[in-house]
Amino acid sequence: MPHSVSLISTIAAGLGLALVFGFLAVRLRLPALVGYLLAGVIIGPFTPGFVADAEIASQLAEIGVMLLMFGVGLHFSLDDLLAVRKIAVPGAVVQMTVATALGMGLAHWWGWNLGGALVFGLSLSVASTVVLLRALESRGILDSVNGRIAVGWLVVEDLAMVLVLVLLPPLGGWLSGKVDADVNALWKTLGITLLQVGGFVALMLVVGRRFFPWVLWQVQRTGSRELFTLCVVAAAVSIAFGATALFGVSFALGAFFAGMVMRESEFSHRAAEESLPLRDAFAVLFFVSVGMLFDPWVLLERPLQVLAVVAIIIVGKTLAAGVLVLAFRYPLNTALTVSASLAQIGEFSFILVGLGASLGLLPPEGQSLVLAGALISIALNQLVFKAVQPLQQWILAKSPLARKLEARDDPTAELPASTDEKYLSNHVVLVGYGRVGRRIAEALKAHHVPFVVAEQNREAVERLRAEGTAAVSGDAVEAEVMVQAHIAQARMLVIATPDTLDVRQMVATARALNPAIEIVVRTHNEAEARLLDSEKAGKVFLGEQELAQSMTRHVLERSGAAAAPGASH
């Protein structure tokens, strides 16, 4: 029996205590991740008793980040990313700028130098990959418009932080005031970094989109489940590591693009399912590793400074993000959801403050304050998400300005006056223009069936109108959107959006405006399908059930079983 078993002891202690404290947190009606964080604090170096290996825990957490981002990439196509670029790119840049400025101002007030203030401000500006994705997945909105905007925003933040981490070392001497900056060296470093990132993205999109699905297909042909699972995990981890080693991009970004190219394979859904248990286990270890970095004494020694840091993360960032989303004429619910998604900090912040400390830019207390802000904001993030709906209702009820903004003049929120009259009566109202909605729209168009699309993504609505398709932007839960789609004169409502949380409200609104309308609903949840059936919401199509029926029908037809009953009569 070896004497050094730090890997085993770290995993055993981390997962075991995470289970205990996660269970207690849920029983106390708190998010489970609060228990995971507390487990990390207990086995960390700042509390008495057993101390786990922080370096090993950090590496295990990195594997969790890779697997999680790989899973997101499997469900997030390049088209999804490009569809939200008009809001995600400027939104992420401006929000990071605002948060960095707030952090720098606070650090300057404390008497820190320029370098320390900049590192501190940047560390407060970038959200945690793991926390954001877990929050979106737990609420079933990862594939919704709000979820795609939040993930696209996160990808832009990750790209920006890759540049920051590369540029910080050559700028370290100048920021500390010790040496003058070499402008030529700085531009050279920036150019090399952009070429590396661009080369990686191009390689994955040009070569990876063909090669990796082919590899997955070859492994699938062996019929070995173990090899298939191994192929998925190996692809996620090895591509992420190779991206960092060869191109200098982050593990998270490398794994994300690995998932995106694997999505081209017809086995991408199975790949996501096979990697799910590992993703969950390593995500727990991520939260445990965060807790291990936290020194609880900072809460007693610097309570006002910790409070100021948390205020920037939860209040400053959310307000900046919310105002930006509203400025792009998205509804209040989208603004609040995206704001809640970004109201925390995580892994990039830890990497940045570590680099800042090693370069002599960040004061010793800086790392403790950032970690305290991360721990508290992560623990509160699920509560922030739960406050979205009540806050939205309260704002609309109390603020005339908010109601005015929600109902402001938006050219894509109304059908153009030039819309052909055939689209405005006896037509189909199609809610959602994602992967399913797009195929339904193509079929309706091919059969010359008039329809109007209701979609939250304004860029998608603009593209549809440019193609000559009738479309309105907005949340179909709102009666105004249904009215603009002429639901009162429609013969059918097709709800093709993956977000089924508001389906019943859509159905109620449609029936109030058109009692005779026929309704078709898509869902992937059996319990939700049974509930919708019991409430007579319309014809409900369950994804897995429809796939099974189609396959069964094909098998019976090809085997001759379909003809047998007829022959006996």
Image (cartoon, rainbow, N blue to C red):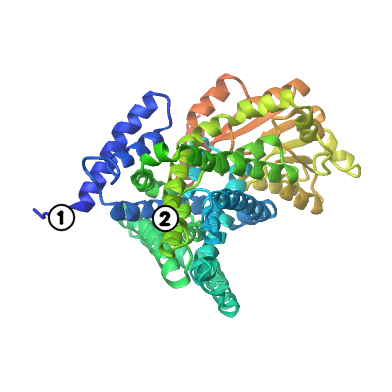
Q: Is 446 left, or right, of 313 in this rendering?
A: right
Q: CA distance from mark 1 to mark 2?
A: 27 Å
Say if 266 sits above or below 419 in the image: below
Residue found at the far front of this picture:
111
Where is residue 505? Give x, y as percent: 66, 25
Where is residue 44? Give x, y as percent: 29, 45
- Residue at position x 58%, y 43% from top? 147
- Mark 2 packing: few (<14 Cα in 10 Å), some, or many (20+)? many
The label number, if any, that marks residue 66 in the structure image: 2
> Observer-nearest residue: 44 or 398?
44
> Observer-nearest residue: 452 or 373?
373
Q: Amino acid at mark 2?
A: Met
Residue found at the far right of this picture:
418
Residue 220 in view, yes or no: no
Q: Amino acid at mark 1?
A: Ser
Could you tell which of marks 1 and 2 lies nearer the N-terminus?
1
> Observer-nearest residue: 424 or 336?
336
Where is residue 204? Give x, y as percent: 51, 67
Say if 374 sits above or below 166 in the image: above
Where is residue 465? Give x, y as percent: 80, 49
Q: Is 531 left, or right, of 36 in this rendering?
A: right
Q: Is 240 left, or right, of 176 in this rendering?
A: left
The residue that disc 1 covers is 4
Q: Quadrant of residue 406?
A: top right
- Residue at position x 45%, y 67% from top? 243
Label 2's element? helix
> Observer-nearest residue: 527 or 559?
527
